[in-house]
Image (cartoon, helix red, strand yellow):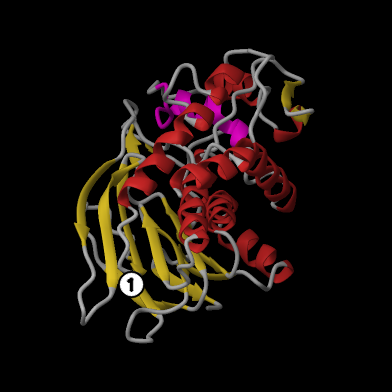
Amino acid sequence: MLFLFLKSLKMKSKLLFYLGCICLICVVACKKSSPTDPTTKLAGVVFGTTYSIKYVADTDYKTSIDSLFQITNASLSTYIADSDISRINAGDTTVVVDNLFLEVFQKSKRIYKETSGYFDPTVCNLVNAWGFGYKKEQQDLDSAQVKTLMAHVGFDKIVVNDRKLRKEDAAVCLDFNSIAKGYGIDVVGRFLESKGIVNYLVEIGGEIRARGVKFNGELWKVGIDNPNTDGSRSFSKLVTLDNQSMASSGNYRKFRIGANGKKYVHTINPKTGFAVESNLLSATVFAPGDCADVDAYATAFMAMGFEKTKLFLAKFPELRVVLLYVNQEGSIQEYTNY
């Protein structure tokens, strides 16, 4: 059955995106269902972070999911030199992209337009230069250096025709890091659904896709992180997911202090090229659709800041959020329409 699924999947994609430096998935736990709790639970490490998968069924799909995660690397991993995306970034114009790449590209293009460029996977060169990308460069860039790199930013500089990607600017670098973790969750969710499983929760690094209910009929409940900067973890609130996807983005954990003493955050503003905090500490986004979409929106909101995000939400009422921001008095406030 796995062969048939993979054969079908190959027509659609090669799956997922490899977000971290780990090249192989490591499944560290599998808890089988019991007569009193028919929930199978998988947990482990993937994409440089942890994952947790729960579904109401007694079949162990660990091996299948393992295979799905491994297939992705040949298509979209910027950490593998001969992956499709790495070859494209290196200037190889012969790469024929698969349906996985095509779907992520099309989603990215749509959200790039919707957010007026605040979501832009071509900010890749700046992410690397600031020290948060796969090249592990680390510089304290000045305005002139940022301006030079900004000349190669813009998702509209890339087009796909007949499954071949063409760059209008050869120096443009593409990285789907800010959407791919959510997309990977969608792939696992779709796989489970293909097996007839309708009650499940898939979580990778805090991003979640929840469908149906737990074995006892209750909706899935998850926590939203507080913006703690000391490495500790606590939750600001618990939320219930009713056939929704959820993704969070925040600069309170992933940042560095430069040689000049300034704080640089991992969210690069595609409009300015600088790794500077907005007044938004964290953005958690909910929607009934794909996790990839809310993953991308959460990233865009961090660059937009609080006020622009509120204006954006007025145009997209299907999106629900919990935003933690700093007001003019310097205190942390919460805004939510959830």
Q: Residue at x 55, y 37 (%)?
A: 176
Of residues 109 and 282, which is closer to you in this image?
Answer: 109
Q: Can residue 103 be seen in this view?
A: yes
Q: What element carries label 1?
A: strand
Which residue occupies the foreground of this view, 303 or 319? 319
Q: Which amino acid does label 1 sit on?
A: Ser
Can you say whether 205 is above or below 129 in the image? below
Residue at the bottom extreme of this rendering:
217
Quick check: 334 above or below 304? below
Is residue 122 rendered magenta in the image? yes
Whole-percent x, y for residue 180 in the image:
51, 44
Q: Which residue is drawn at 68% across and 50% down?
A: 111
Would you place residue 239 above or below residue 248 in this image?
Answer: below
Tell me which corner region of the image, top left, top right, bottom left or bottom right, holds residue 161. Answer: top right
Q: x%, y% of residue 115?
A: 69, 52
What residue appears at the point 32 percent right and 43 percent down from the top-left corner? 46
Would you identify the image quadrant in which residue 131 lies?
A: top left
Location of residue 298 in the rendering, given as x and y in whole percent from the top left corner: 53, 56
- Residue matched to label 1: 236
Please, which residue is most extreme toward the right here?
A: 161
Query: Residue at 61% across / 36% down in the picture?
Result: 101
Q: Pick whichever, 312 or 104, lies toward us.
A: 104
Which quadrant of the figure has residue 41? bottom left
Q: Quick check: can you spot residue 284?
A: no
From the viewer's perspective, is 32 left or right of 297? left
Name the chief secondary structure element in magenta. helix
- Mark 1: give few (<14), some (14-19) or many (20+) Cα within 10 Å: some
Q: What stretch is highlighted in magenta?
A: 120-135
Residue 127 in magenta? Answer: yes
Work out whether residue 80 or residue 169 is closer to the camera in this orientation and state it: 80
